[in-house]
Amino acid sequence: MEETIQNTILITGGAGFIGSNLCEYFLESGYKVICLDNFSTGHRYNLEAFITHPDFKLIEGDIRNISDCQLAVEGVDYVLHQAALGSVPRSINDPVTTNDVNVSGFLNMLVAARDANVKRFVYAASSSTYGDSEGLPKVEEVIGKPLSPYAITKYVNELYAEIFSKTYGLETIGLRYFNVFGRKQDPKGAYAAVIPKFVTLLMNHESPVINGDGNYSRDFTYIDNVIQMNKLAISTTNPLAINTVYNTAFGDRNTLNDLVKYLKEYLAEFDSEIANVEVIYGSNRVGDIPHSLASIEKAKTLLGYNPKYSLQEGLKEAVTWYWNNLKKN
C-alpha cells in the first residue's frame, strides 16, 4: 500500500477570525499546519482548541520581518496568506501602517514563498478592489478605482501576485472575500465587523447604529463558504484555475436593514426582548461601497465551487455560536 505524503500548510494570520477557522479545518483534514501571527489583531483563544495538536505549530512573528517569513515557510507546501490589517476606516486613519502590513508584508511573504519553492500561494484578496465600479454583479475582470487606502493595498497584492506568477513561476490564487462572517469573529474594538458588533449590542438590549438609511447592500459570506474556496484553491489541478483571482461569496445580496431584521429574529429565539430593540440610523461612512454583489460563475466553472450557506443559513449557525460564546465574555 502506497504511503500518503502529509502536506504542510502555512496559514499567516492564523490566530485571526478566518485564519483560525482555516487552521482548525485543515488540521481536521489531515494536514500539518503552521500558524504565523503577531497577535496584533488575532487572539490566542482562537487557537485553544488545537494548540496542543501534534500537527500544529505556532510561530509568533510579523510578516513585516522577512526573517520571520523565511522561518515560517521552511518545508511548507502551501501558503494560505490571511495576515493583513483589515478595515477601511482603520486605513483612512492610519494609511502608513496599513500599507506596511498589507503591501510590504505581502511582498515579504511572496519572496519567502518563492525562495522556499512553495507549491502554491493562496491569498486573501478583497471585494474592496471593485472600488467605484457600479456594475452588478461584480465580475473579476471589471474593477473600478479604489475608494480607500485599504482597497489600494489589496489591489496591489493582486498585481504583485500576478508578477510573481509570470516572472518567477510561483503559482498564486487570490480570493476576493466579500463580507465574511461567522464563528470566532471578534465583536470588540473600534474596527469590529458589523455582524458580531450588532449581535453584541442586541444581546445587551442596546441599539445598533446603521450607517446611512440601511439600504446599502452586501454579499454576506459565511465562513464555511470561505473555507471551501481555500480548500479548492490549494487542491485544484486545473491549469486554467491558477494564477488568477476569484470572488469568494455566496452570490446574493442583502441590505443592512435585512441583516438587522434577521439578527433580531434569530436572537429573539434566545431572548424575546431582543425583537423590541430599536435601530438607530447615522451618517454614511467614508470609503464605503454602496452595493456589493459577486458573480461566482468563475469559481463555479474553474474550481467547482458550490457555496452551502446563504446569509440566513449562516446567521442561524453563527447566532447560536455568538449566543453560547459572547455571553461568557
Image (spheres, rainbow, N blue to C red):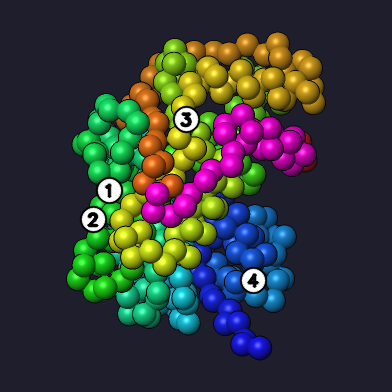
Distance from the alpha carbon under mark 3 to that under mark 4 = 33 Å
Distance from the alpha carbon under mark 1 to that under mark 4 = 33 Å
Distance from the alpha carbon under mark 2 to that under mark 3 = 27 Å
Give left or right: position of 91 versus 160.
right
Q: Quadrant of the N terminus?
A: bottom right
- Residue holding disc 2: 159
**Residue 302: quarter of image:** bottom left
Q: Give the camera-side residue of 204 and 245.
A: 245
Dot 1, how many residues are within 10 Å of its Cα: few (below 14), some (14-19), or many (20+)? Answer: many
Q: Which amino acid does the dot numbered 1 rest on?
A: Tyr
- Residue holding disc 4: 30
x%, y% of residue 131?
Answer: 28, 35
* Residue 252's disc number: 3
Residue sitting at 59 percent across and 38 percent down?
A: 309
Who comes first in sequence, dot 2 or dot 4?
Answer: 4
Tell me the mark number nearer the camera, choosing from 2 and 4.
4
Who comes first in sequence, dot 3 or dot 4?
Answer: 4
Q: Which residues are magenta?
A: 301-326
Say if 1 sits above or below 108 in the image: below
